[in-house]
Image: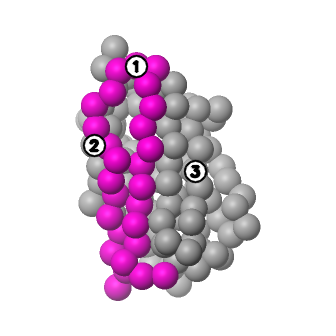
Amino acid sequence: QVQLVESGGGLVQAGGSLRLSCSASGRIFSGEVMAWYRQPPGKQRELVAVIRGRGSNNYADSVKGRFTISRDNSNNTVYLQMNSLKPEDTAVYYCYLARLGVVHWGQGTQVTVSS
């Protein structure tokens, strides 16, 4: 059973930056799909960014050009660099890993962007 632990959330002013990290308890394989989701207050969880094998990435339209997802398989870690943050980016951010048809989630990290 893999465990995912997010870190790096916090309170930041609009226009600022944060870098989220997601560390896995075991090895991350290069072909595995990993992603970041977020759940704004009172809303459903939504996909933010996906990274697949060989580093191919996809982003939600709302974060394109501002957020960057990356992975370091040697350190079993996935990152989300968030720049030019907006108040509407306020949410709990969750790490996601799909492995052999089973979805694994982290516990989430709170990101709050003040205006």
Q: Which mark is residue 110?
A: 2
Q: Badge 1 is on which residue?
A: 14
Residue 12 is drawn in which quadrant? top left
Distance between mark 1 and mark 2 Cα atoms: 15 Å
Rounded to the nearest whole Å, what is the CA distance between mark 3 and mark 2?
Answer: 17 Å
Q: Position of residue 111 (x, y in %)?
A: 32, 38
Please check the rendered image and state whether residue 23 is part of the magenta-colored stretch, yes or no: yes
Q: Does residue 24 appear left or right of residue 65 in this picture?
A: left
Residue 40, given in percent of the width and then of the height, sits at: 33, 37
| Within-10-Å neighbours for mark 3: few <14, some 14–19, many 20+ | many
Q: Amino acid at mark 2?
A: Gln
Q: Amino acid at mark 3?
A: Ile
Going 58% across and 79% down the picture, which residue do you hit? Answer: 29
- Can I make out residue 45 in this image? no
**Image-based side of 112 in relation to 88, left or right:** left
Question: On the image, numbered disc 3 is attached to which residue?
Answer: 69
The segment highlighted magenta reads 1-27
User: What residue is shown at x 37% (from left), y 78% (from top)?
Assistant: 25
Label 2 packing within 10 angstroms: few (<14), some (14-19), many (20+): some
